Image: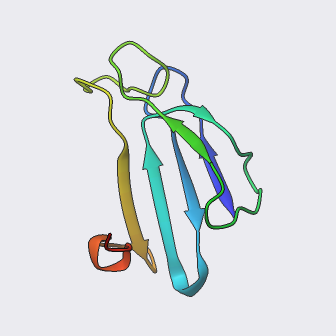
Amino acid sequence: MVKVSDKGMGFNSLVIKHAGGYATLYGHVSKFLVSEGQTVHAGDPVALSGGTPGTAGAGMMTTGPHLHLAMYKDGEVVDPLPLLPQN
């Protein structure tokens, strides 16, 4: 399940809710490839990253292109590194 926050030139983000009480937030989105409420699966493209100053999704304090990633478990911030594949 996806929640989209489109603030135009502000901080655009989307949140994907996962099984087990997990959720991931992706910020500085320049273009959404999914709609709010849509079900997505592993590997589905969901957005294009942005963050370049003066572009959609960058926000006011960004200094260069990047993606903001945050992970939550039952509403609490968790370190995503132990949960991500190690390549």
- Looking at the picture, the colour scheme in use is rainbow
Residues 87 and 60: in front is 87
- Is 80 positioned to the left or the right of 56 in the image? left
Work out which quarter of the rendered image holds the N terminus and state it.
bottom right
Q: Is residue 19 above or below residue 25?
A: below
| Count of marks, rendered view | 0
| x and y percentages locating residue 13 in the rendered image | 50, 43
| x and y percentages locating residue 39 in the rendered image | 76, 63
Q: Is residue 11 above or below residue 19?
A: above
> Which residue sits furthest bottom?
20
Picture quadrant where residue 5 is located: top right
Residue in view at x 25 percent, y 26 percent: 61
Residue in view at x 32 percent, y 28 percent: 65
Residue in view at x 27 percent, y 27 percent: 62
Q: Is residue 50 above or below residue 16?
A: above
Residues 2 and 43: in front is 43
| x and y percentages locating residue 32 in the rendered image | 63, 37
Picture quadrant where residue 2 is located: bottom right
Picture quadrant where residue 43 is located: bottom right
> Which residue sits furthest top?
54
Work out which quarter of the rendered image holds the C terminus and state it.
bottom left
| x and y percentages locating residue 11 in the rendered image | 43, 33
- Is 3 positioned to the left or the right of 73 in the image? right
Q: Is residue 70 above or below residue 55?
A: below
- Is 71 positioned to the left or the right of 19 in the image? left
Residues 77 and 64: in front is 64
Residue in view at x 26 percent, y 24 percent: 64
